[in-house]
Image (cartoon, rainbow, N blue to C red):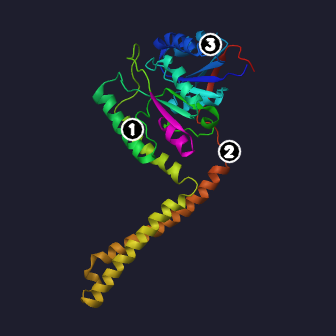
Amino acid sequence: MTPHISAVIPVFNEEGNLRALEQELSAALAGMKVEYEIIWVDDGSSDGSFAELKKICADTRQLALRFSKNYGQTAALAAGIAEARGEWIVTLDADGQNDPEDIPRLFAAAASGFDVVSGWRSARQDPFFSRQLPSRAANFIISSVTGVRLHDFGCTLKVYRAALLKSADLYGEMHRFLPAILGYAGASIMELPVNHRPRVSGKSKYGILRTFKVVLDLLTVKFMGDFITKPLYLFGGLGLGLGAASLFMASVTLYNKLCNGIFVKDQPLFLVAIFFALAGMQFAFMGLMAEVMIRTYHSANRKPPYSIAEKTAGRRAI
């Protein structure tokens, strides 16, 4: 039977956490009394994670993919989402810090009329200065820039309407921005507090430098959300602004020459006006070029940003 819920779990060097997580996840999904499947994506682990997943996938409801190398969490989620057949997709980390018992509550909220229900680690079990403080700063910046107000964009535990999620393009490290990306597409979003547990085995793959990557990626998300169909509005607007500033400074220069007898060569403002005028024309042409590239982007056939080296599964129904 076609599953109603697909659980997608990216895995990277989490051998010691997989068996316990699988038991908890299977129990939580089975208790919901709906058809489900579990999809594990091994993101090029160097430990015995995939060997463990092969044993786990003797269950007919489970599937495991193995990347040929480490492509990152976004690519792992994209691969799992592409394989998912359920009407709803739930994502969670493989480190065991997300609690599968929260899934029924998130799903009930989604079924009440929301496209995305995002988990909020309100009592987060991570070091404050190295993990929580940078995360809070990043969440504040993302909420302010995108207009999607969430306390915890970084929590992987989320429930999505599959039809909407499958239409999103995932690349780079954009997985943390999924609520914002789907919000730009008109998704209704809700956030619920979830349980967050201490890590039992293995070590975190994230550091404080991730905050700086978030800020850079946010520029892409903002552009893709607000200007992907009309980049000329952004670049052309900058060009017009610089052109207007250039005209104002040139007018001041002319006024000083005619009324105050100050020679143009003695007015540095005139050089600034020339620079602004040239920069404005460059931005205008960049906008036109971006318009052409966007049309090419929408018409081109795009391949997934990953390659699968091996695939194993139980006897899933077709």
Give, as a three-letter code, the residue at label 2.
Asn
Q: Earlier in the sequence, mark 1 or mark 2?
A: 1
Residue at 64 percent across and 50 percent down: it is 298
Q: Secondary structure at mark 1?
A: helix
**Residue 130 screen position, x and y as percent:** 30, 29
Q: Nearer the viewer, residue 285 or 28?
A: 28
Q: Is residue 145 left or right of residue 80?
A: left
Which mark, residue 301? 2
- Residue to which mark 1 is pinned: 139
Disc 3 packing (10 Å; few <14; some 14–19; many ≥20): many
Q: Which residues are magenta?
A: 176-192
**Residue 39 screen position, x and y as percent:** 60, 21
Q: Earlier in the sequence, mark 3 or mark 2?
A: 3
Residue at 63 percent across and 39 percent down: it is 167
Number of numbered discs on residues: 3
Disc 2 packing (10 Å; few <14; some 14–19; many ≥20): few
Q: Nearer the viewer, residue 287 or 123?
A: 123
- Residue to which mark 3 is pinned: 57
Residue at 33 percent across and 85 percent down: it is 254
Give, as a three-letter code, the residue at label 3.
Cys
Answer whether labels 3 and 1 touch (C-beta < 8 Å): no
The CA distance from mark 3 to mark 1 is 36 Å
Give, as a three-letter code, the residue at label 1.
Asn
Spot the residue most to the front: 112
**Residue 84 screen position, x and y as percent:** 64, 26
Disc 1 packing (10 Å; few <14; some 14–19; many ≥20): many
Q: Nearer the viewer, residue 47 or 121?
A: 121
